[in-house]
Image (tube, helix red, strand yellow):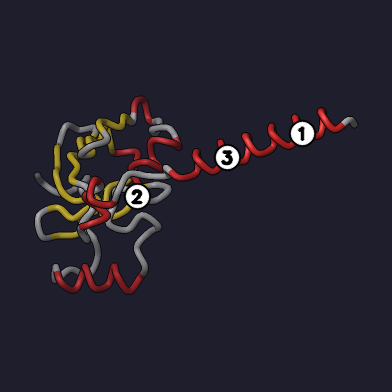
Amino acid sequence: MTTLHRRRALATARALAGAVALASCRTSPPPQAVPQATSPYGAHSIVTLVDGKTFDGEVLAITDSSWILMVGDRVASVRDGAISNVRVADLGELRYADGGRPSASELHRARRVTRFPYGIAPEAMAALLAKSTQSSPDDLETRRP
């Protein structure tokens, strides 16, 4: 390799390293722009069930098979199969059409705005239920709006 080729290769490597460094500087919006980063609460949502009932409340967590919400002052859950759609503040509508689910990326984005994005620890669930004087979460399929 000639000296000219080495210089070009070095210049290219430096330019690539600089581009990677600049691209990595912007990873996310500032915390002040994300309500969940400055508040202990999850995003507000409106859940519409297949039977037409509608509930609104804070999204506590999203599991593999259900949504857990704070509806009024009570902890509630609803299984995916009972959901028609969910409208999550700042994210839009997630559809559960024909027994399906929203895409994995849509659910990932929705989990990021919940109060417990990595799931509710048993101790946290126990504290929420105790505060609401409940022994278990309400089932939204059987609860009246």
Q: Position of residue 52 (x, y in %)?
A: 16, 32
Nearer the camera: disc 1 or disc 2: 1
At a point 26% along the width and 30% down the height, the residue shown is 93
**N-terminal-most mark, 1 or 3:** 1
User: Dividing the image into 4 quarters, which one contains the C terminus?
Assistant: top left
Are discs 1 and 3 less than 8 Å apart at CB?
no
Tell me the distance, in whole angstroms, between the alpha carbons under discs 1 and 3: 16 Å
Circle 1: residue type: Arg
Nearer the camera: disc 2 or disc 3: 3
Circle 2: residue type: Ile
Q: Position of residue 74 (x, y in %)?
A: 14, 60
Label 2 belongs to which residue?
62
Residue 18 got which mark?
A: 3
Disc 3 crowd rating (10 Å Cα; few below 14, some 14-19, many 20+) is: few
Assign a secondary structure to mark 3. Answer: helix
Tell me the distance, in whole angstroms, between the alpha carbons under discs 2 and 3: 39 Å
Q: Is residue 60 above or below residue 133?
A: above
At a point 30% along the width and 32% down the height, the residue shown is 94
Q: Residue furthest front?
A: 3
Assign a secondary structure to mark 2. Answer: strand
At a point 21% along the width and 50% down the height, the residue shown is 35
